[in-house]
Image (cartoon, helix red, strand yellow):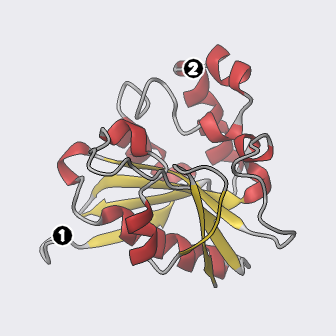
Amino acid sequence: MPSSLRLRFHPLTPGRWNDFETLFGERGACGGCWCMWPRLARPEFQKQQGAGNKRAMNKIVESGPPPGLLAYAGHQAVAWCALAPRGTYRVLANSRILKPVDGRPVWSVVCFFVAKPFRRRGITTKLLEAAATYARKHGARIIEGYPVEPKTGVRSPDVFVWTGLPSAFVKAGFAEVARRSSARPIMRREL
């Protein structure tokens, strides 16, 4: 990452909603998601896709605790990382591939969104480092994520790597602890 890009990280609180809304834009980051995909059963997500998901995320932000972190370059929010205790995310509870590795309590990093002009500059790694710090301050002892492993020699479109890439997790001090699918490692960092 160029030294001229200095990032600051802040939890998404009600006072930062406008920054989040601007970052996600009219499309809600991707197809009206508003980072609700990991929190909902698929039929519920599809039913409220778009404006409904935006309202649901706003309600989460308003009621707290913060559902993730925003990365800022100057006064502009340029990236997002969703993190919370694992039980927050229904998609994990229903996944045989991403089922718990053991009975230890963990925090999960489930989603990233980086504004297009800021992609491929190492921001995901910096978000993971900030997420580890934030989770530790809030009592977490383990943080884990579920990146997607691209096929060898194939560059995945950005939209398909919203859970991150293993290389970013490794750079942020995570290690693979399980793999039940060739494309989806479970990566952890002890805090």
Name the quarter where the C terminus is drawn: bottom right
Residue 9 screen position, x and y as percent: 41, 68
* Any part of residue 104 in sight: yes
Residue farthest to the right?
103
Q: Residue at x 64, y 81 (%)?
A: 137
**Dot 1, how many residues are within 10 Å of its Cα: few (below 14), some (14-19), or many (20+)?**
few
Q: Is residue 47 above or below residue 166?
A: above
Q: Is residue 42 left or right of residue 2?
A: right
At horizontal 48% and vertical 50% (from top left) the residue drawn is 148
Image position of 103 (left or right of 112): right
From the image, tell me which residue sits under label 1. 5
Task: Give the SS element for disc 2.
Answer: loop
Q: Nearer the viewer, residue 173 or 70?
A: 173
Q: Is residue 10 above or below residue 40?
A: below
**Which residue in the structure is indicated by mark 2?**
49
The disc labelled 1 sits on which kind of residue? Leu
Dot 2, crowdedness within 10 Å: few (<14), some or many (≥20)? some
Residue under the image location 23 percent in, 73 percent down: 6
Residue at x 28% of width, y 46% of height: 115
Q: Nearer the viewer, residue 46 or 183?
A: 183
Quarter-of-image position of residue 122: bottom left
Mark 1 or 2 closer to N-term? 1
In which quadrant is the N terminus drawn? bottom left
SS under mark 1: loop
Question: In x, y percent, where is residue 173?
Answer: 48, 81
Q: Is residue 142 left or right of residue 125?
A: right
Q: Is residue 10 above or below residue 36?
A: below
Q: Amino acid at mark 2?
A: Gln
